[in-house]
Amino acid sequence: MNGLIFQDIHALAAGLRRKDFSALELVRAHIDRIRSCEDTISALITRTEELALSRAAAADARLAGGDAPLLCGIPFVLKDNICTEGIPTTCASRMLADYIPPYSATVYARLQAAGAVLLGKGNMDEFSMGSSTENSAFYPTRNPLDISRVPGGSSGGPAAAVAAYEVPFALGSDTGGSIRQPAAFCGLVGMKPTYGTVSRHGLVAFASSLDQIGPLTRTVQDNAAVLSCISAPDGRDATANRTFAAAKDLFSGDIRGISVGLLRFPGDAADPAIRAAVESVAAVLADRGAQVREVRLPALSDALPAYYILSSAEASANLARYDGVRYGARAEGAASPDELFCSTRSTYFGPEVRRRILLGTYALSAGHRDAFYLRAQSAARRIRAAFAEIFATCDCLLCPTTPTVAFPAGEKSDPVSMYRGDLFTVPASLAGIPALSLPCGTADGLPVAAQLMAAEGNDGLLYRLAAAIEEVRI
Ligand code: GLN
């Protein structure tokens, strides 16, 4: 049964239907894998073994009935900022260490309705702030491909779980790169869909105008299948107004006539090996009939500061709810409500979360708002306009996902060097457009990734191109 863990979702779904193995056997194989890997990788904060076994039995009954959905019986992990009724949801923060949500996120409800089986909640940077999972208040996660290195972040736990074959897919959340960058560091396919494609009801908010949930998988087709399952308009999230449905012909490999812009980034600091790998992706696309040309978008030079100002400003507002009164942890012995508020927050928020709240509060404060918040907003508007202009003449953009491969744990101790690593991922977040990261080679034995971006709503096009690239790579 051990070979089971190495199969992708589509192969597993076929095996379940042929009765080569049962959902219970499948889930047990993954539980065994989790038991043998977790001591080294620490991808998970909470494991849900017992619940998973009972769900697997239910999945078997449904499969026996004959018309089960594709994901029925397939194990998965959720990032620990996605609410799961009755199961701890900590955001890797001491503030929410004991929080058990009384309701489930829409994405979790949809996966459960499809019969997929939750095996655990993935580690992350506290409240999704970070790029290495070293900001988890509990413990760091290791990169399964080289345990001296980080898995990326903030969805590092979900990514490491998929890369270590603990589960065939996971959901992460992406505000400025938190699905794409860990996918890049762990050799996976990671998708940040168009803003509004997936409901955030039950996702603990970081920066609401940017947050999106999306899948981490080992293949392009699996990724599209998971996105199809979780995507739908939702009355509980007024921003969720789109549906993604994976059409079969997406994976034909036919990309003739699609125009691709090889994006030369202002201030591009990507390692030469990464640049070379992305160039070879461009060559593959051209070879298969896409029209490739170089493009430049000078407006992107402001993306990184604009992202850090806007996301921190929104975070400072969203995180004001953890006040020691309504929910979350509460400090002892405060003499007044003000003192309770301050001591709760300084005791239970980690240093990066406190830094972002300070940064955001400062950027919004009287006297500094014009210089920071409003300037960042106008930079974001310019970035959106620049993308709209380029997508009038070009279907898709190609660039690296990250400037480096997975870096050694502990290497980036100052925040700004960590922030710089988000250079390539934040523009798509600011513009609300879909962006997908996929492996495109290795450097020093570690995965290198390419990022594809398209106009709002063109999520399917990214899968079409990614499938063509994946075919050649394999
Ligand atoms: N690394 C970025 C940050 O720290 C992105 C995080 C995210 O997408 N949640 O803000």
Image (cartoon, helix red, strand yellow):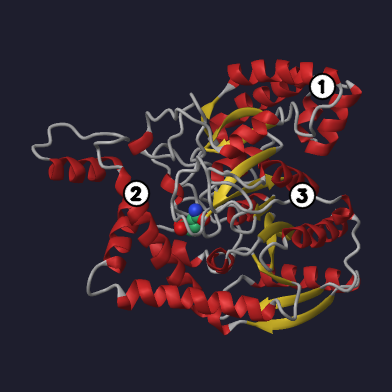
Earlier sequence position, callout 1 versus callout 2 = 1
Q: Position of residue 430 (x, y in %)?
A: 53, 67
Question: Which residue is label 3 attached to?
Answer: 245
Q: Which is more toward the observer, 427 or 445?
A: 427
Q: CA distance from mark 3 to mark 2?
A: 34 Å
Q: CA distance from mark 1 to mark 3?
A: 23 Å
Q: Residues within 10 Å of mark 1 (few under 14, many from 20)?
A: many
Secondary-structure class at tag 1: helix
**Amino acid at pointer 3:** Ala
Q: CA distance from mark 1 to mark 2?
A: 43 Å
222 horizontally vs 390: left or right: right
Earlier sequence position, callout 3 versus callout 2 = 3
Q: Say if 363 sits above or below 324 in the image.
A: below
Residue 63 is marked as: 1
Question: Which residue is label 2 attached to?
Answer: 319
Q: Position of residue 166 (x, y in %)?
A: 66, 33
Q: Say if 254 sits above or below 376 in the image.
A: above
**Amino acid at pointer 1:** Leu
Q: Determine if the C-beta at disc 2 is less than 8 A from ligand 1.
A: no
Q: Identify the residue shown where x is 14% and y is 41%.
A: 337
Q: Position of residue 359 (x, y in %)?
A: 31, 63
**Amino acid at pointer 2:** Leu
